[in-house]
Image (cartoon, helix red, strand yellow):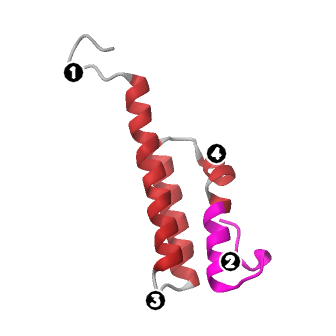
Amino acid sequence: MATNPQEIDPVAEEAVRARKLQRSVDVSLALITHSPDLTVGASIDIVIAARRIALELFPESGDTFDMLYRPRLMRAITERFGLDDDALPEL
């Protein structure tokens, strides 16, 4: 625990960033699956924006995002629009 009120506990700070990232991915999934007028292109833009947020919160975490969250988001797009897995571009 930090003794100086202006010091930030690095573990607590990382937990806050992790919650922000999870919330971002959750909102992205909700938008992809429930927005009635969403296009495939707009869905891909949502995935790109979520990845950008991940990189802002955790620099150099692009590979981790691509392994953990990108497949979930892309699967939501393929299921929503009835696409083949091969139909979407690599991001």
Q: Which residue is mark 2?
A: 78
Q: Amino acid at mark 1?
A: Gln
Residue at image position (40%, 24%) is: 10
Q: Which residue is mark 1?
A: 6
Question: Alpha carbon of mark 1 to alpha carbon of mark 4: how far?
Answer: 31 Å
Residue 69 among those drawn in magenta: no
Dot 3 crowding, Cα within 10 Å, few <14, some 14–19, many 20+ = few
Residue 85 among those drawn in magenta: yes
Question: Residue 52: horizontal and vertical position, in percent?
Answer: 49, 56
Dominant SS type (magenta)? helix
Question: Alpha carbon of mark 3 to alpha carbon of mark 4: how far?
Answer: 30 Å
Q: Amino acid at mark 3?
A: Asp
Q: Secondary structure at mark 4?
A: helix
Q: Amino acid at mark 2?
A: Thr
Q: Which residue is mark 3?
A: 37
Q: Is residue 20 above or below residue 52?
A: above
Question: Residue 87: horizontal and vertical position, in percent?
Answer: 75, 80
Closer to viewer: mark 1 or mark 3: 3
Residue at image position (65%, 65%) is: 91
Q: Are marks 1 and 3 in contact (CB under 8 Å)?
A: no
| Precedes in sequence: disc 1 or disc 3 | 1
Question: Alpha carbon of mark 2 to alpha carbon of mark 3: how far?
Answer: 16 Å
Residue at image position (42%, 40%) is: 17
| Precedes in sequence: disc 1 or disc 4 | 1
Q: Which residue is mark 4?
A: 64
| Precedes in sequence: disc 2 or disc 4 | 4
Which residue range is magenta in the image? 72-91
Q: Are marks 2 and 3 in contact (CB under 8 Å)?
A: no
| Precedes in sequence: disc 3 or disc 4 | 3
Residue 27 lies in what quarter of the image? bottom left
| Precedes in sequence: disc 2 or disc 3 | 3
